[in-house]
Amino acid sequence: MNSNNENIIQISEDCKLIVPDNPVIPFIEGDGVGPEVTSSMIKIVNHSVSETYNKKRSINWLEVFAGEKANKIFKKDIWLPQETLDAISKYKIAIKGPLMTPTGGGQRSLNVRLRQKLDLYVCQRPIKWFEGVPSPVITPQAVNMIVFRENSEDIYSGIEWPHDSNDVKKVIHFLKNEMGVENIIDSDNCGIGIKNMSSLGSKRLIKAAIEYAIEHDRSSVTVVHKGNIMKFTEGAFLNWGIDLILKKYHGFFDEKNKCYKFKNPNNEKDIIFKDCICDAFLQNILLKPKDYDVIATTNLNGDYVSDSLAACVGGIGISPGANINYTTGEAVFEATHGTAPDIAGENIVNPSSLILSAEMMLRYLGWNEAANNIMNAIEKVIKQKTVTADFAYQMENATLCSCSEFTDLIIEKI
Ligand code: NAD
């Protein structure tokens, strides 16, 4: 790696990335199938960047450690070293393979810790069908959404106490005696978790979704929530979104169509701002997916919604993802599947999720031409039905290929 200050991505005062031609990008290889998908992704990105920009641009990959590899190297029961967090903060953008969540010892998910430590408050998941990919729905081509899931608050904050702890007794005592709560059943054996949702956390997430819709000329933003039941958290999330639309984006309520609208300042077209209750949304994505475009949702809902939508277009093997802080510019792009220990080391894993996450990363860097070349190549390879085992067994007349053969085919098509 060739690292000097010239190769470090900077953020301008108006929060725009300033990307040098040879930026240092840290990567976490990941556990299980991590080394296989990471090696595939790096080969494809290097080839696309080099071909697209005639060798004028390249990425200086810097390996940083997390998960099992960190634990082996640091030998101190360290799964997410401070050095890794510092490197991502310094170089701003990183990409990671899947990380195993160690069981036992109270170890929390490394992915959740990484998002929280770097305050990567948006989990962005584009959901689009590639022609030929086996899907359980009849019209997967109608699914074309991008999910903005709130990443830093909600019941996932980790503010919780086990049922048999002294702390939970204190919390329950407070709730009963100070707050007049009467409906905790079996209070001697009851765990408690806190669902916290703030104006800051909600508005910055919804703003990111709105800005995306403006920049990419999308037709609507839908807030997905359970505000009918959880009024002061999920309901407030929607209300803060409406507040943002009315005050910051000069939106208005369209009486005829019963929805809010605001103008895209780039082309004066109306963008619809609507909401949907999460359980209805999970039906609607199967029944009328065309009604939805950009989605802004809370942390827990977003977890369910992202994977359910991913299933509509072929599953997590092909779904990319990114965790982004639009204020600091820091972002970690990642495979959305797990470590797949049952197939690790066999060269049969589908590397598409991490490749498409890298495609998102190149777009985030503003290297759209290199991203387009990867996207076109992967579309062509899948369309010609030369695919890894997860897809091949569900496609008619498919040709089975290994992870490395699939990688070489994409490189050939770039
Ligand atoms: P998993 O995604 O690893 O595997 C589920 C099933 O899908 C397995 O049969 C696997 O072989 C298959 N699969 C997954 N990705 C595939 C791919 N790219 N190509 C072909 N087949 C693929 O989920 P899991 O088994 O529940 O979790 C295993 C480990 O991964 C756990 O430790 C979990 O905590 C971790 N995990 C990490 C992430 C992440 O780092 N983002 C996400 C989910 C799970």
Image (cartoon, rainbow, N blue to C red):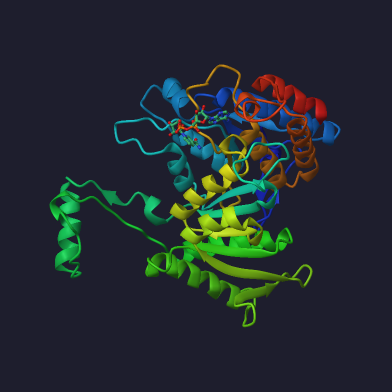
Image side of residue 411 versus residue 54, left or right:
left
Q: Is residue 204 above or below residue 126?
A: below
Image side of residue 160 versus residue 402, left or right:
left
How far across and down, in percent of the image, does residue 14 sit? 66, 60
Among the 4 quarters of the image, the one containing residue 348:
top right
Q: Is residue 343 above or below residue 168?
A: above
Q: Residue furthest top?
A: 346
How far across and down, in percent of the image, does residue 16 sit? 68, 55
Q: Is residue 245 above or below residue 406?
A: below
Image side of residue 234 versus residue 219, left or right:
left
342 or 123, nearer to the observer: 342
Answer yes or no: is residue 322 visible: no
How far across and down, in percent of the image, does residue 13 sit? 65, 59
Q: Residue at x 58, y 69 (%)?
A: 274
Task: Say how many tags the image has.
Answer: 0
Among the 4 quarters of the image, the one containing residue 21:
top right
How far across and down, in percent of the image, does residue 315 sit? 58, 38
Quadrant (top left/top right/bottom left/bottom right) for the N terminus: top right
Among the 4 quarters of the image, the one containing residue 56:
top right
Answer yes or no: is residue 166 visible: yes
Quadrant (top left/top right/bottom left/bottom right) for the C terminus: top right
191 or 203, nearer to the observer: 191
Q: Residue at x 58, y 58 (%)?
A: 295
Image side of residue 114 versus residue 91, left or right:
left
299 or 7, nearer to the observer: 299
Q: Residue furthest bottom?
A: 255
Q: Residue at x 57, y 48 (%)?
A: 309
